[in-house]
Structures are given as C-alpha cells and as structure tokens.
Image (spheres, grey):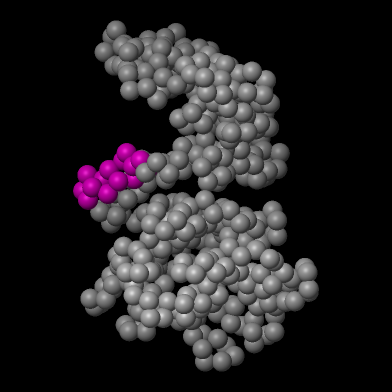
Amino acid sequence: MWIALSAQLHFLWCDYVVGHNSFPDSNIKYPYNDKPRPYVCTVCYKWFTTRGSLYHHTEIHSERNPHTCSQCQRRFVSRRGLKSHMHSHGSRYKCSDCGKCCSGKTMLKVHKRIHSGEKPFECSVCGKWFAHTSSLTMHSRIHTGQRPYECHICRKVVRYSHQLQSHMRAHTGEKSYQCHMCQKAFTTSSKLNIHLKVHTGDKRYKCHSCVRAFYSSRDLRRHMRVHTGEKPYKCSLCNKSFRFSSGVDIHKRCVHSNERPYHCPFCGKLFKLVREVNAHVRVHTGAKPLSCRHCSESFRLHGQLKSHLLKSHNEGTWFTCHICPQKFTYKGNLKKHIRRHEGVKPFVCDVCSGSFYTAYEFKHHQLVHSDSRLFSCGLCDKEFKSTLYVKRHFKKCSEGVAFENVL
C-alpha cells in the first residue's frame, strides 16, 4: 500500500521514499482521462488514481487465493474478483443472446455490443470505430506516438502496460510459459501459442504476393510491408521511416543516443542492444551456436553463417553492385558501397563541415574535435581516443610479454 504526498511516494511498510521521477508513467497525460495517478504498483508499474484501487490491484500479484466461491469452490485473489464471478451464478442483468450474467445495467449494455456489433466511439484521426472508450484511448496512441510506459532499467518506452510487463521479464529472465513438446520457455502465453504451431507446421497465413506463409496474421501483416514498401513508423528526430515500431526504438538508441544500458558480465563492456551483448559474450565463452545445415561448420554470428552459406553452398541471395562486380551479403552494405561510386556523403560534421560516407567514419572523425580519451592500454595505462588506436598500440606494447603476465 502507498501514501502519495504531493511530490513524493511513501511505502507504508518501510521508510523508503522515492520521488515521482524514479518511476515511469507518473505524469502521463491521458487523452480521455486526465485524472492524476500518483499510486504505482512496483511489480508491473501500473498507475492508479486512488490508494484503494492500488490495494485491490496488488492482490493480483499475491500467491494467496483467500476468497472462495460458496457455490463452485473456485478461489480468487481479490474480493472484487469473487464478486464479479458470483454474477455468473445468477443475476438479473443477464444477456438474452448468450446467457452471460453481468454485474450491472451498464456492464450489460457494454457486453451486448459484442452481439450487436455497435461501435459508438470514433477516432477523430482515421475514422475507425470502437466498442469501448478504453480501446479508443489505446488506439489513439498510434496517431499521437504516445508511449507512456517506460522501463526504469533500460528506459525503453512502450504504448501499453501489458507490453511493459512483458518487457520487464527480459530483465528478470522470467519465462513462465513452457512448451510441453520441447520444453522451450517463453515470456508470454501468446509467444508460446505461436511457437506451438512450429511443431504442428500450421502456417495458415499465406502471402498472395510470394510463396511465404506464416504462423500468425501479425507476422503476415508485417511481411506485406516488404511488398508494399510501407514504412509507417517515423523517427521524431530525423524523420527516417521504418517498417516496424521496434526499428524506430533501435534507431534512436543507436543513432541519436549514447546510452548503453547493457553490459558484458565478463569484461563489463557496454552495449546499446541486447543482441549485441549476446553476440559479444560468445567471444568469452567460445560458443558457436549457429550450425550450417550442409556441413559440420559452426559460427558465432548470424552474419558469419549467412556469408558461409552464400560462399560455400550457394544458398541465399547476393546483393551485387550494378556499377562494379562487387557482391555483398547484406543490402545495407551494398547501399554504403554505392555511395562511394556516387560520391554521396550524407554525414556532415557541424564543426568543420567535413562530410563522410558512413556513420562509423563520421563518429571516428568527431574524436578529432574531442579531448576525451576513454580507452586505455591494460599494460602501460596509456590513454587513447578510440578502440582502433588502443588495439593498434596494444599489439606493439604486448610484444614479448607472456599471456599469463598480461592477465
């Protein structure tokens, strides 16, 4: 239980005090409900308008089920859940179409929209209609770009509370949903359901433009953007467009931010993306989990496997330059290569007006204008501006030094 005091939040069971800014979502502007929500659940980070609402909500996370139905012995974590359930055993507010009992006249009216198809709430931007105000509120975030739920660990922001709950499991490592066929575990039930189709081979969603088929309608919709060229998600800082919302998040972190929330447990090196950490850790462990289906070769990185399949087994598609015979395994590398033929240098230094072909060249150049030396030699403590220089120096510095002495 919490007590909210103007600018601070207090736990009742200890002396811990935390400011509003320490938690995500405390100052959200709700388009259709602008009531202040000063009470936060520390398990799922959902916010509430009253202390009582928070108290009832916290029972959801309790392992106890103290409230029992007197008619069917079903148990519930909250009185509210039991009270709602009791209406299923009989109520004067009963749906004439399906027999479901509702807790009141208003709830019955809302429920009947399922059968009538009534959708009285219209989006003022795209004209789409909804059966509930809550559905309209969540939909409106697509147009406003509002992402009110923020992870307090890595600062990732998402549109909906259930997305935040699912994301938090990436940090805790919790995977409660396990496949009964291969024992693989997942963070959400929806991911497990999609995975189960891998075992059944059920790819009912087929693309009408190519031969590909998918396990879910969501994957098919995302795939169709490859054919249509649709890129509905834009970066608010540079207007670059992306096919998926996750692309915007990754782009902002990689291009417009220096934040590196993920670290290597072996050497402490910092990274911007989880997948970068996972790939880097294999340098320490020596793991090569990616095996070639045609031969006994195994690889540490997806790029290495893809390159091997193309060069050794002629599997996959080369991206060939139309100006010279050079070939690339990734389309992005081909685009960078073509810039050199065309003389396009999109990255311009705002200090000296120097221009560069790639972001990497641009970032390396910026070190010229900086006095910071963040990298040091582990043998002589000499400091350098970039990893390139420190690696070059280390080769010379470590000549004739036994490896055990370096450690």
Give the answer, above or below, for where 162 lies relative to 48.
below
Q: Answer with left or right where residue 186 lies relative to residue 390.
A: left
In the current view of this chain or complex, which residue is farthest to the bottom? 324
* Magenta-colored segment: predominant secondary structure: loop
- Counting from the top left corner in percent of width and height, residue 401 is at 37, 76
Tell me the residue at 30%/46% (across/down). Answer: 185
Residue 216: tell me if it is visible. Answer: yes
Residue 213: tell me if it is visible. Answer: no
User: Which residues fall within the magenta stretch?
Assistant: 174-187
Give the answer, above or below, for where 32 lies relative to 66.
below
Front residue of 100 and 162: 162
Tell me if residue 185 is in the magenta stretch.
yes
- Counting from the top left corner in percent of width and height, residue 250 is at 55, 56
Assign the C terminus to one quadrant of the image. Answer: bottom left
- Counting from the top left corner in percent of width and height, residue 147 is at 61, 42
Front residue of 188 and 171: 171
Give the answer, above or below, for where 265 lies relative to 207.
above
Tell me if residue 259 is in the magenta stretch.
no
Q: Answer with left or right where residue 305 lies relative to residue 19.
A: left
Give the answer, above or below, for where 328 lies relative to 274.
below
Q: Answer with left or right where residue 110 lies relative to residue 6.
A: left
Tell me the residue at 56%/20% (across/down). Answer: 10
- Counting from the top left corner in percent of width and height, residue 110 is at 54, 22
Q: Answer with left or right where residue 1 lies relative to residue 32.
A: left
